[in-house]
Image (cartoon, rainbow, N blue to C red):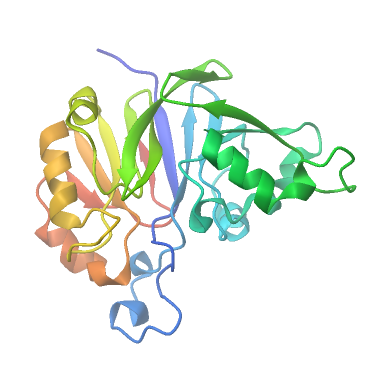
Amino acid sequence: MTHDPLEIEFLGTGTSTGVPALGCECDVCHSSDPRDVRLRTSAIVRYRGVNLLIDCGPDFRTQMLRASDSRLDALLLTHIHYDHVGGLDDLRPYCYQRDFPIYAKQDVIDALHARLPYCFAEHPYPGVPLLHITPIDTAPFEVQGVEVIPVPVHHYWLDIVGFRIGPLTYITDAKTIDDDVVDSLRGTRLLVVNALRKKTHLSHMCLDETLEVVRRVQPERALLVHMSCAMGFHDEVQRELPPGVELAYDGLIVNV
């Protein structure tokens, strides 16, 4: 079966603190390997002529200044945590011609109205980012003709979403994924999924848990994101991974 080509550019692959983390004196945070320097997790998916940003964290401005193509058509939000929404105010250059489209769950929308009330005022102050937010649930939706399928996962007690777009499934911040959801992901050519570190964590999958999800989904290729310095050195960890599984890194561009 042939597929329309899809490109994903990893703007950031780090956890909420980024790597290096402030105040951390570990060897990874002092690594000279640029692949060990990780901004907060975010990506651009380019598919059928549409550029979709997934999450917009506090490093958004820096990420877009170094992106290979800064054009954006819409934003997909996985959840409300600051490392995934902290850059929304920097969307204002994308709002000059129109209200910028955002797709998010209702709980995320409610929280954004509380955090950024000036963006949604009846008479907004000139120059604020103007955002048009469309609520989503678990039903597929379209962005300029591109079908996006929400993938429900659990971030400890918080229900969040990943996204399936063509041959790609993108999941971040998951701790558990229901069996029926895992089953539905079989056939994914490229699986992007979080793996915080090797040691177990309360609200994120550790490396072994992530590798078990990969084993069950059986994608052609899997790329790991949302990593902390506790994962270890990129080069060393990569050598330990099974075939077809790789650590993503900031700036990596993959075509499917």
Quadrant holding the N terminus: top left
Please provide percent x and percent y for residue 146: 50, 19
Q: Does 2 sit above or below residue 172?
A: above
Does residue 70 appear anywhere in the picture?
no
Q: 218 or 198, which is in the foreground? A: 198
Quadrant holding the C terminus: top left
Q: 27 or 99, which is in the foreground? A: 99
Horizontal relation, residue 73 to residue 232: left or right: right
Please provide percent x and percent y for residue 24: 37, 83
At x 44% / y 68%, what residue is drawn?
A: 17
Q: Residue furthest top?
A: 1
Please provide percent x and percent y for residue 240: 10, 60
Does residue 253 appear anywhere in the picture?
yes
Residue 228 is drawn in which quadrant? bottom left
Q: Residue furthest front?
A: 157
Q: Does 90 sit above or below residue 16?
A: above
